[in-house]
Image (cartoon, rainbow, N blue to C red):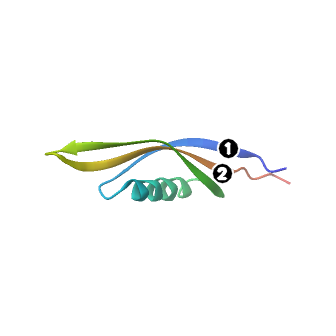
Amino acid sequence: MTMLKVIEVLAESETSWEDAAHRAVAEASSTVRQVRSIYIENMQATVENGRIARYRINAKITFALESER
């Protein structure tokens, strides 16, 4: 049986929510191995001068734990 763990990650991008999701996965992958999925829990944006300045996501990233066999 594979044991999974979920971490919560906040990420932002000046381009899009999709880019913010890519950044969240890249950041998580730099510190944990075997990332399996991302669940976008919340999306928001900051507005400056009537335009979206930054896209932000709150994501849950799932990865597999390694067994010591």
> In this rendering, would 36 be left or right of 17?
right
Q: Nearer the viewer, residue 48 or 3?
A: 48
> In this rendering, would 17 be left or right of 63?
left
Q: Residue at x 49, y 59 (%)?
A: 26
Residue 65, label in figure? none
Element assignment for label 1: strand
Q: Residue at x 63, y 42 (%)?
A: 6
> In this rendering, would 16 be left or right of 42?
left
Q: Residue at x 39, y 53 (%)?
A: 17
Q: Residue at x 63, y 48 (%)?
A: 62
Marked residue nearer the N-terminal end (2 or 1)? 1
**Tag 1 residue:** 5
Q: State if disc 1 and disc 2 touch (CB < 8 Å).
A: yes
Q: Nearer the viewer, residue 6 or 16?
A: 16
> In this rendering, would 8 be left or right of 18?
right
Q: Position of residue 23 (x, y in %)?
A: 44, 57
Residue 63, label in figure? 2
Q: Residue furthest front?
A: 50
Element assignment for label 2: strand
Mark 2 is on which residue type?
Answer: Phe
Q: Is residue 45 above or below residue 66?
A: above
Q: Quadrant of the C terminus?
A: bottom right
Q: Is residue 44 above or below residue 33?
A: above
Q: Nearer the viewer, residue 35 or 21?
A: 21
